[in-house]
Image: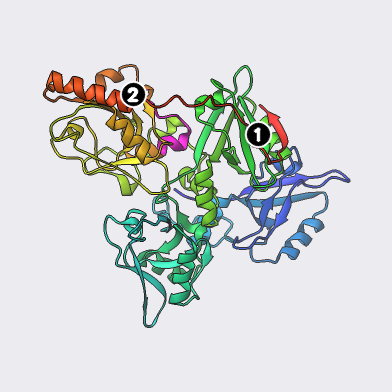
């Protein structure tokens, strides 16, 4: 049952002391927000979190009052003030469902009848030589622009766009009042990629009936090709094993050096990952010292939400926070650990008929031998985005017999991790493999949830007996002479010129401040 019962927090301050937080109202955010919590201050120690909404001050309902009125009520309370607080996720869901927040019980529906509000969708499109694969149309008597001619299998369709979706934003800018030509120009200005905020007819009708304002804060990010990662760390004898630094030029808190073999390295933390949240707290607006304090307060275990450079740029293009991913994954609970993620249901868009949704999250190690018809699959990728996936698996072919399925994500080829490799690089590895091929793959839903936990996807996740679980496709043995000749040709092709010795270089020209090692 989903309820919206607030927490009651009573704060007391001594003379000359503050309560240790800022009260803010922000553009595109509803409610009175808790921001910039002072580490070790009364508010932080009492359990207030960044993004919490204040509903009541000393019993007075304040959600509909102005900022100055709420500030005055807090000041009038003197040294001791009681606050009714609702966390950010619950507040937004309550608003979307039209819950009466002034109700002291804040239980929107009868037990067992709670239903999550429908979501808008963020879709990221990377243009190919044939364009994005959609058209825009307007309907007489209906405001807005709608998607049409969304062809199955093309860029827009694969990104989650559907016919009759209404377009709300282009690259984070609301275009509902724009003309058709202005929107087309806006999309063209985006270059080779665009982030769209869309709403389908059913969801649009839901929010219109409730007369609720809608925006990206109500969107799902499940269609986005790149996602943030949860990194769960347990401190080792030498700490977590990473350096945290602040880059004034880019804005944000970044991972510097990561010690090889350290807890951070084993959990998948990478150099230049940007730290979005620490233990559920958005640190984007925090100072370097505040982030350091949050990490030190973690004691021996700490959870991070991080984004790599490509993922960060994608979210920034849409002017949305990666915290949307955090909220969607955790619901009203804390972010999942790896063991918790094993029982997460597969997302609806990637579930397969007849498959147990609570099936353990495991990759698949597929071994194949080439037949006269090849391996029987196509390797696909999205232009401009790292990562490859399997399509057009031939029924009865080597790949099919080895357990491969359409849309499987490719993780390793012949023991080499290819998650950060280009399409051409992966193709080259496969071509050089000769007549046998070993590929570690995972269904898209499994891959996304494993990535979200911060656990590296390797054959070790198959358990100690993974060799016995490996599926192998048998094929007739090739002619020995042909095999020997082909092997010689592939060895000649794979023998590159000796490259010049590479030296380790550090980035020059960037000025970093506040370097803290853990």
Q: Which residue is painted at 18% across and 29% down in the image? A: 370
The region drawn magenta spans: 449-459
What label does residue 244 carry, if any? 1
Number of the front mark, 2 or 1: 1
Asked which quadrant contains residue 56, the reply is: bottom right
Is residue 112 covered in magenta? no
Estimate the x, y position of residue 240 in percent, counting from the top left.
61, 25
* Image quarter hosting the C terminus: top right
Q: Nearer the viewer, residue 62 or 300?
A: 300
**Position of 467 compared to 23: left or right?**
left
Mark 1 nearby-residue class (10 Å; few <14, some 14–19, many ≥20):
many
* Label 2 vs 1, first from the N-terminus: 1
Which secondary structure lies at badge 2?
helix
Residue ID at (55%, 39%): 305
Viewer-proximal residue, 495 or 90? 495
Residue 482 image offset from top left, x and y in percent: 15, 23
Identify the residue at the far right of this view. Answer: 15
Number of marks present in the image shown: 2
Give the residue pinned by disc 2.
462
Marks 2 and 1 sit apart, C-alpha to C-alpha, by 33 Å
Q: Is residue 99 visible?
A: no
* Dot 2 crowding, Cα within 10 Å, few <14, some 14–19, many 20+: some
| Residue farthest along the bottom direction in this orientation | 141
Residue 161: percent from left, percent from top? 35, 60
């Amino acid at each position: 049952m989903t309820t919206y019962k607030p927490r009651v927090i009573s704060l007391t301050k001594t003379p000359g002391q503050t309560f240790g937080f800022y009260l803010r109202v922000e553009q595109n955010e509803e409610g009175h927000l808790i921001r910039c919590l002072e580490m070790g201050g009364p508010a932080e120690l009492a359990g207030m979190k960044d993004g919490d909404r204040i509903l009541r001050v000393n019993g007075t309902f304040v959600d509909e009052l102005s900022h100055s009125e709420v500030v005055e009520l807090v000041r009038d309370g003197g040294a001791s003030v009681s606050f009714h607080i609702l966390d950010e996720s619950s507040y937004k869901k309550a608003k979307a469902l039209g819950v009466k927040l002034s109700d002291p019980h804040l239980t929107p529906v009868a037990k067992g009848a709670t239903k999550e509000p429908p979501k808008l969708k963020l879709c990221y499109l990377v243009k190919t030589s044939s364009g994005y694969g959609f058209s825009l149309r307007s309907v007489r008597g209906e405001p807005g622009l709608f998607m049409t001619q969304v062809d199955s299998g093309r860029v827009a369709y694969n990104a989650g766009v559907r016919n009759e979706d209404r377009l709300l934003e282009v690259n984070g800018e609301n275009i509902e009042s724009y003309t058709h030509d202005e929107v087309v120009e806006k999309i063209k200005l985006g270059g080779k990629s665009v982030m769209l905020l869309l709403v389908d007819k059913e969801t649009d009708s839901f929010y219109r009936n409730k007369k609720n304002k809608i925006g990206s804060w109500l969107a799902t990010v499940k269609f986005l090709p790149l996602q943030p990662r949860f990194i769960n760390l347990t401190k080792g004898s030498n700490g977590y094993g990473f350096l945290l630094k602040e880059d004034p030029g880019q804005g944000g808190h970044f991972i510097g050096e990561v010690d090889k073999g350290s807890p951070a390295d084993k959990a998948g933390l990478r150099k230049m990952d940007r730290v979005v949240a620490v233990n559920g707290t958005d640190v984007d607006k925090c100072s370097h010292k505040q982030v350091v304090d949050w990490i030190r307060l973690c004691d021996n275990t700490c959870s991070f939400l991080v984004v790599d450079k490509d993922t960060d740029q994608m979210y920034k293009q849409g002017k949305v926070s990666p915290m949307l991913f955090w909220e969607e994954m955790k619901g009203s609970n804390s972010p999942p650990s790896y063991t918790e993620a094993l029982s997460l249901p597969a997302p609806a868009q990637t579930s397969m008929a007849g498959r147990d949704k609570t099936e353990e999250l495991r990759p698949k190690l597929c071994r194949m031998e080439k037949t006269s018809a090849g391996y029987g699959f196509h390797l696909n990728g999205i232009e401009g985005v790292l990562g490859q996936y399997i399509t057009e698996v031939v029924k009865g072919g080597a790949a099919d017999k080895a357990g491969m399925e359409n849309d499987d994500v490719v993780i390793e080829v012949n023991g080499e991790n290819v998650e950060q490799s280009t399409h051409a690089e992966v193709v080259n590895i496969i071509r050089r493999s000769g007549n046998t091929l070993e590929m570690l793959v995972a269904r898209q839903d499994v891959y996304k949830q494993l990535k979200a936990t911060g656990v590296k996807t390797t054959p070790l996740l198959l358990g100690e007996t993974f060799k016995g679980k490996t599926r192998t496709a048998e094929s007739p043995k090739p002619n020995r002479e042909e095999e020997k000749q082909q092997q010689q040709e592939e060895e000649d092709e794979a023998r590159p010129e000796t490259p010049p010795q590479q030296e380790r270089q550090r980035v020059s020209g960037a000025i970093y401040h506040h370097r803290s090692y853990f």
